[in-house]
Structures are given as structure tokens and as C-alpha cells.
Amino acid sequence: MELGYIIKIIVALGTMAGAAKVVYELSVGGKLRLREEYRFAKEFLKDLETTPKLHHLAEERGYYALAGTSSMKASEIKYLVSLRDADRRLKDYVLARRYVVLKEGTNKIGFRDKYRSVWSRTWRKVIHIITYMIGSFLSFSPLLVIQPFGLPPKYMLLVFITLPCFGFFAVDFMRSFVKISRGEVLVKEQQEHAPRIYVEKEHRKTAGTVT
């Protein structure tokens, strides 16, 4: 095996690993939005604390903006921001919402029935990873099969077709793997305690009534 072909394989594998890392980081949130999210969260939570009768529409809109989506219940967001490491838990829930749900009866986050067993999640993660690797290989296949099959260099141009086609599916399966993984972390690490901001508000109301 020639050195040039070995280098191509190493580059392809490195690109696959790099792409997986980028997909993961983009899925769980980037650093560029942190400052803006911090400013909004600070202002919104301050409004909740200083305005006892904040209009329900403004409150719901605020929670939706905090989560970055309006496709979930405000009550779900309230619970998530009450957990430790609230920012990460909120992002995990938004990301893994296909697999997890906040159960109103127990007020705890658990897996949906279809994904409740460890086995049902494990085989899906394995398939997602294998499919990602296959899709990534097919994306760079024109660069990898030219030498073994003795194809002319012009076939390298096929990478402009295989990369966007198979690369899209590879990224999609990697995102599915990340969603299940973050859902597992969320279910495992959630903390059972009452929402702090609401407890504090009720405490101030009680103190004001007593005085």
C-alpha cells in the first residue's frame, strides 16, 4: 500500500472524527450565543422576581425564548430551569425531546415508552454510529477507491456529489446518536427539588403577609 493512499485514509478518518465533534458541539449549543443568552436570561428571571403579577403571555413568551422554541410547554421549561446546571439541562431536553418527556404525575423527566429500556436505546445508538461511519466513508469514497480499483484521477470529482449526498445522512444519524446520549445524561442527572425562583417568590409573599 502506497504512502499517498495511507495519507488519504488518515485524512478521511480525521475528517469523520472532526465532523462528529462539530455535529456534537452544534447540537448541544455553541459558545457564540452564550453572552446573548446570559443577558436575556438575567433580564427575564429578574422580571419574574420583581413583577409578582407578570402577564401570563409575557411569561410564556419569555420561557419560550429561554428555551429557543415554542414547541414545548411552559411548565416543562419551568421545571428544567429549576434543576442544577439548568442551562445544560434545558438544552439537553430541547435536543432529546423526541426521546424524553416530563411526566406530570411524578414531575420527573423519563424516557418515552418506546425508548424506556436500555436495550432499545443501545441498539439504536449502535446503528446510528455504524450508519454514520458508512455514510462518512461513502462521502469520501471517490478519494479512497481510486487507487485500489485503478480508476483515473477524474473520478475524484465525484466527491462533489457523494460528499453532500451521503454526508447529509451521516450528519443526521450522528445527531440522532447525540440526542439519545444527551437524553440519557438528562434523565440520570436531573435533581429533585422545587423550582428555586418560585419558592423564593412564595417565601417573600409569605414574609410580606406576616409583617
Image (cartoon, rainbow, N blue to C red):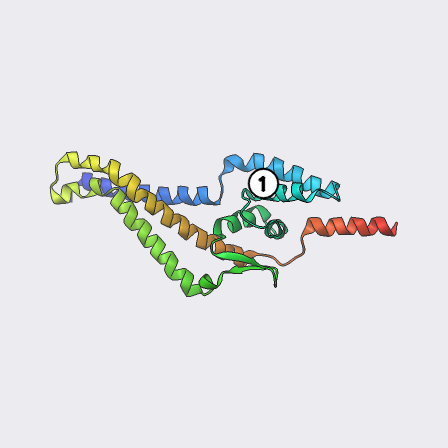
Residue bearing the label numbered 1: 65
Q: Position of residue 123 (x, y in %)?
A: 37, 61
Q: In this view, does 176 lie to the left or right of 91?
A: left
Q: Position of residue 161 (x, y in %)?
A: 25, 38
Q: In this view, does 29 lie above or below 97?
A: above
Residue drawn 45% across and 65% down? 117
Please identify the residue farthest to the right as the structure is shown.
Answer: 211
Q: Is residue 145 above or below residue 193?
A: above
> Can residue 20 be seen?
yes
Q: In this view, does 107 lie to the left or right of 185?
A: right
Tag 1 secondary structure: helix
Q: Where is residue 172 in the image (x, y as percent from the top left)?
A: 37, 47
Q: Position of residue 73 (x, y in %)?
A: 58, 50
Q: In this view, does 76 lie to the left or right of 26?
A: right
In the image, 36 versus 104, the foreground residue is 104
Please, what is the three-letter code of the amino acid marked with disc 1?
Ala
Residue 66 occupies quadrant? top right
The number of numbered discs placed on residues in the rendered structure image is: 1
